[in-house]
Image: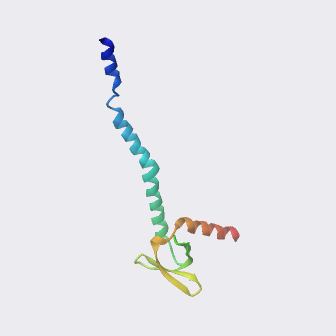
Amino acid sequence: MELGILLQATAGSPGWTTPVMMGGMILIFYFFMIRPQAKKAKEQKAFISNMQKGDKIVTIAGIHGTINKVNDDGTLSLETSPGSYIKIEKSTISPEWTANVNKTVEAKA
């Protein structure tokens, strides 16, 4: 009889392990998914707000050009070739590709 009571008492897990495991999973999601995305969005916003006339950029569609005019409505005029201009949204500029292109240009110079 004593053995049966002892087995029943140790068969269940303590009540505090489930909340601790859930908290651990939430921390893992925060540090590996949410935080890096928020950091990347913050860096992109800073990059876009610091653009000015004459900067060489690359859009997410792969269009290379030089900024001709920055408008207040969230758009800019991009010179793709001499005398050829297109109007694009600021949010379509890729900070990663722009940085890579600018590094390659500096390395060749």
Q: Is 103 above or below relative to 85?
A: above
Please state the horizontal and vertical placement of residue 58, each as a whole percent of the image: 55, 72
Q: Furthest residue to the bottom?
A: 83
Horizontal side, residue 9 vs residue 34: left or right: left
Task: Work out whether residue 72 or residue 82 is closer to the camera in this orientation and state it.
Answer: 82
Q: Is 55 above or below relative to 45?
A: below
| Residue at x 45% of width, y 48% of height | 31
Q: Where, quadrant-wise, is the N terminus in this rendering?
A: top left
Please state the horizontal and vertical placement of residue 54, each as a whole percent of the image: 56, 78
Please state the horizontal and vertical placement of residue 73, each as a whole percent of the image: 40, 78
Q: Is 27 above or below relative to 90?
A: above
| Residue at x 35% of width, y 35% of height | 18
Horizontal side, residue 33 vs residue 63: left or right: left
Q: Where, quadrant-wise, is the C terminus in this rendering?
A: bottom right
Colour pattern = rainbow
| Residue at x 44% of width, y 52% of height | 33
Residue 3 occupies quadrant? top left
Please state the horizontal and vertical placement of residue 102, each as a whole percent of the image: 61, 69
| Residue at x 45% of width, y 65% of height | 45
